[in-house]
Amino acid sequence: MTAYSHLLAPLDLGHVTLENRVLMGSMHTGLEETKDWNRVAEFYATRARGGVGLMVTGGMAPNPEGGVFPGAAGLYTEQDIENHRQVTDRVHDAGGRIAMQILHAGRYAYSPDCVGPSPIKSPISPFPPKELDEDGIEKQIADIATAAARAREAGYDGVEVMGSEGYFLNQFLVAHTNKRTDRWGGSYENRMRLPLEVLRRVRAAVGEDFIVIYRLSMIDLVPEGSTFDEVVQLAQEVEKAGASIINTGIGWHEARVPTIATSVPRAAFTWVTKKLMGKVGIPVITSNRINTPEVAEQVLAEGCADMVSMARPFLADPDFVRKAADGRSDTIAPCIACNQACLDHTFSGKISSCLINPRACYETELAITPTERPKSIGVVGAGPAGLAAAMTAAERGHAVTLFDRDDRIGGQLNMAREIPGKEEFHGLVEWFETMVGELGITLRLGQTATADDLDGFDEVIIATGVVPRDPGIPGQDGPNVLSYIDVLRGKAKVGRRVAIVGAGGIGFDVAEFLVHEGESPTENLADWKEEWGVADPSEARGGLAPGGPKPDAPARQVTLLQRKAERPGKRLGKTTGWIHRAALRMKNVEMMSGVNYERIDGTGLHISHGEARENPALIEADTIVLCAGQLSERSLADALEARGLSPHVIGGADVAAELDAKRAIDQGTRLAAIL
Ligand code: FAD
Ligand code: NAP
Ligand code: SF4
């Protein structure tokens, strides 16, 4: 018997049996819009080979007005059907199963042509939707049913009808967005009419032997959201209308509660799905922040659901299921829920990928193939850049020696993992440790590499990272001034009143570190729910606690400063910046921009404002922490170049500006792929 007896158990859907209880949830990768169908097919086929029970594609628009943006992929023409058939054929050849998600964005469509139940603009879009009349509603239903029929024609095993996350069907369900007085609005029976009619027509269009998943919003996390009685009522009607499976949706896109970011506890919402178990006769899928086979197994063993949906974990590692089944879950590249290369890309109009796995969505372009000429390769620096290069080179058959002056691998990730809400970085460093061993990399820890140490290697890779930038503030040599390294390595005592110089990613993280005390809310679901105001939807409509968020008092009084006149945190992650800003606001962190640092003395940090250095002020502080950015650590690279050698320089050692682990890993992987 396998360690994951629930996860790997088959699921009988009547006309078809899924091999296991793992669904790869829908992700908009942007691949379909490239129109490179070989690339799309390879993305899904790679994951099918990895053993996932069923995959759902990114959302396909049923018609132009329902597209998330103008030109969003859909199944409109015969040619579209032919294109999608390449995907389904390749997946079936690989032994997998795939359903197509039909996504009508309603008022979330980024287009002046968007439509909805009522002309109420969403807070995340500039366009108010046109209110649909009776004919307009009939057209949407017919178009969704037609898209389902075309999906079947294109060879899909099923469709997922997107009814959650605040999209079109969800907008009809909730009074907040549906102010209609006709048969499509008013009572809950009327508001349910559209999703149910859609499902009946979809089922009629595809026949009985076809999977129809309905993604149902089980906790809306918006004002006037559904109660759980309404969720149960809808689920029972959804079953009668012909759905084969109900999938869980958590929170609308406009919700002000994080639902999938790394600071959300693992499996944070499975208790919501569990409330539906036993209320319907069809299988129920749970979702959100499930990223290891252990967590997924536990969720199923506790009876929270019949199946588990994971999406981003399949970007990080397409072989997730196969490795779990082989008892090698420690080798699964972990999704750390950072959103940096997936959702942040999607929302910036770029192709998705993965911070940990740069091959995600680049399967046809970035090949890691065995080398024909094995070399000896010396890599200096076991941060993410050096680790990615060392692992890729070793995977290809090169003999790799990896040096780090620290007594452990990870580089700056060892500071990131200390931040409350970034606990996933522990798993990432542990995975790197496992893989360094697996790949037979020779590790030289506690050794500051010199140019002499690198004599004799066929290739040398310098990944020595960065040094903190010196902001040159008069008085910064005083005993009350620390660098972020002193603080995060736990070596220094920090006072109760703190001024932080620099509001970049590290300044924000240091502020988060300093306002917390004791257990991180990410490790304690009850605390986290209280902090963000999440309640049981049986007790509070939409799952929003009546008293709102109730964070613990801040452990310190923190002021976060920057010189630029722009809003602090503006450059943080596209989909996560608001969470960092909201989290610090909840802890009363004062954020100041447009300041000049005049001097530091025993009373604190003296500043002035604007180019004219006006309005002098004192930020009273016991400790001043410098987070003023970073510069490349190039001393070793320079020493080698002075000897006439040409080392490969990557990561922060190459370019420190706007460096993050995503770029470091991508650069290391791509370099080693061609050595
Ligand atoms: P580093 O990680 O700095 O590694 C360089 C390594 O080289 C070090 O281990 C060092 O000991 C070693 N070294 C240097 N010289 C020598 C020598 N001569 N001999 C031997 N060894 C040597 N990035 C993200 O993408 N997402 C985040 O959420 C995130 N959060 C962060 C939070 C904090 C608090 C910090 C500090 C950083 C964070 N980062 C984050 C940034 C990310 O960690 C860095 O961008 C990344 O680590 C840079 O990788 P690197 O390999 O170039 O350098
Ligand atoms: P950063 O994001 O570039 O921020 C540096 C900060 O220092 C800015 O606020 C900058 O603002 C200030 N600064 C720059 N020069 C200064 C000077 N001479 N004197 C005083 N202040 C100065 O760099 P970082 O915070 O050190 O982060 C390093 C990298 O790690 C970043 O690229 C970041 O992306 C990455 N990181 C990412 C995350 C994440 O969650 N994704 C988290 C942490 C770190 P002003 O110039 O306006 O003063
Ligand atoms: Fe997960 Fe981050 Fe990769 Fe996205 S980029 S799949 S969140 S690890």
Image: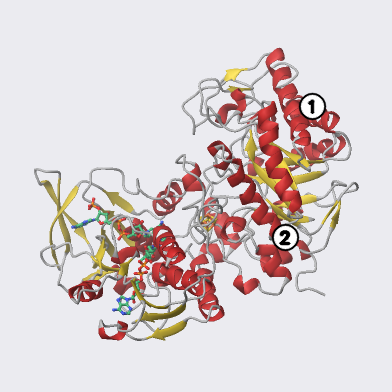
Q: Residue at point 69% right, 34% down?
A: 82
Q: Residue at point 28% right, 60% down?
A: 656
Is 103 drawn above or below residue 112 in the view shown? below
Is 191 drawn above or below residue 559 in the view shown? above
Display coloring:
secondary structure
Is 512 placed left or right of 255 in the picture?
left
Q: Residue furthest right?
A: 14
Is residue 202 visible in the rendered structure shown here?
Answer: yes
Give the percent coordinates (x, y) of residue 61: 64, 31
Instruction: Indicate which disc residue 438 carries.
Output: none
Residue occupied by mark 2: 51
- Amino acid type of the residue that numbered disc 2 sits on in the rendered structure: Gly
- Amino acid type of the residue that numbered disc 1 sits on in the rendered structure: Glu
Q: Earlier in the sequence, mark 2 or mark 1?
A: 2
Give the percent coordinates (x, y) of residue 468: 25, 67
The answer to which image quadrant residue 151 occupies is top right
Give the percent coordinates (x, y) of residue 444: 40, 85
Q: Give the quadrant of ligand 1.
A: bottom left
Q: Nearer the viewer, residue 382 or 391?
A: 391
User: Which image quarter is the C terminus in?
Assistant: bottom left
Residue occupied by mark 1: 197
Q: Residues within 10 Å of mark 2 (few under 14, many from 20)?
A: many
Disc 2 versus disc 1: distance between alpha carbons? 34 Å
Is 21 placed left or right of 541 in the picture?
right
